[in-house]
Image: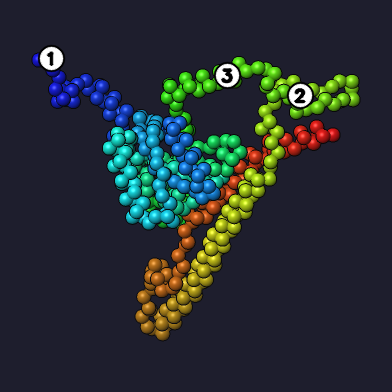
Amino acid sequence: MAQTTASAVLGGGSKSSTASLAAALDIEGNIPIESVQIEALVVMKILKHSREAQPATVSGQLLGLDVEKTLEITHCYPVPTGSAEGADEIAQYQVDMMQCLREVNVDSNAVGWYQSAHLDSILEPSIIEMQYNYQKNLKKSVLLVYDLSSTTRGNVSLRAFRLTPEFMELYKKGVFTTQSFTLAGVTFDNIMTELPVVIHNSAVLNMLMHELSEPAATADPASMLDSRRLFSSRNTGAGSTLVDSAVVNPAALDLSLNAPLEKNLESLLESVDKYNYNRYQYQYWQRGVAREQSKIQQYIQRRRLENATRIAAGLAPLPEETESQVEAMFNMPKEPSRLNHILAAGKVDNYCKQINQFSGPALSKIFTIRELQQ
């Protein structure tokens, strides 16, 4: 009698607990994602996959579960590149991988994909199309971008992105004219929205990291790096000696400015060339429209003069065509897609921001070293 059947648990349980469980799982997908939590093991897998394939970019599948407003990523696996395998082979590989993961009781719920990139160059038509397909089929899917160039400078850059609802609606229509972008209120600033990323470690791993950090905290102070080994004492001219006794991080004195700045400038020039190419295409279309509009006006004027002559001669005037009928008589050029133009403008803006962020600290280091050398 004390046994509880499955039907009693599902049907006779507390309505409040059932509602809270449904809200947490969000089966309908109505709760928007506000943050991304990724396991440290997943981060290591992405870093390893991207580092082994350098300088080529790679991609892979993200697996996990969305809990309320947080998307938890617990597993991932790489996907073969299109050059190595065909589209059918890649699709079959993903199906087989998901089945194998399900058999070993690993999370097999797709929540997005990851992509390695250089200098956060994610505003590419292929990446936009892929993310649109993911969000169309999986409402809460995200794109996780791993920046290879930032990692070479000692910073692990992992950023999560989603396409905005306005751009999703615009991309669904498939019309990328100037008017459509204006009516939708879409610019390169609001094509994608960035979500905060939190790296999660298990309690056991946190304890291990704490134990590994203890020897460093109790190390012999004599073995620590002293800034006096980096800076030599010099007379300031006022009878005092300039000696900094603080511990200095050698990475702060890194003056390797050429490599990252050169890559940013090369990418910027390439994006400017693409922007100009799309701008020339748009200007060519405008000149074609102007020529056809001039022909249409000439045709309308001739028809009006002909009708006036017929009326004066006592004849019935010729029927006047509508504006759409007149345009159909001429070869009115179609407006080129403005999507590539918008994406190129966004890449130019992104590279300019990166150059500004990098140039400030770099110039400070240069002036500091110059003063120390005097």
**Residue to which mark 2 is pinned:** 228
Percent across and percent down for residue 147 are 53, 42
Which quadrant would residue 16 be assigned to in this image? top left
**Residue to which mark 1 is pinned:** 2
Disc 1 crowd rating (10 Å Cα; few below 14, some 14-19, many 20+) is few
Disc 3 crowd rating (10 Å Cα; few below 14, some 14-19, many 20+) is few
**Residue to which mark 3 is pinned:** 215
Q: Give the residue at the far top of this rendering.
A: 2
Percent across and percent down for residue 158 are 50, 37
Residue at 51%, 19% (x, y): give it: 211
Q: Nearer the viewer, residue 318 or 354?
A: 354
Q: Quadrant of the N terminus?
A: top left
Q: Nearer the viewer, residue 327 or 137?
A: 137
Q: Is residue 220 left or right of residue 198?
A: right
Q: Quadrant of the C terminus?
A: top right
For the residues labelled 3 and 2, the Cα–Cα distance comes to 24 Å
Q: How many marks?
A: 3
On screen, 17 above or below 46?
above
Residue at 70%, 33% (x, y): give it: 253
Percent across and percent down for residue 100 are 30, 41
Q: Is residue 268 left or right of residue 11?
A: right
Disc 3 or 2, which lies upstream in sequence? 3
Residue at 13%, 14% (x, y): give it: 2
Disc 2 or 1, which lies upstream in sequence? 1
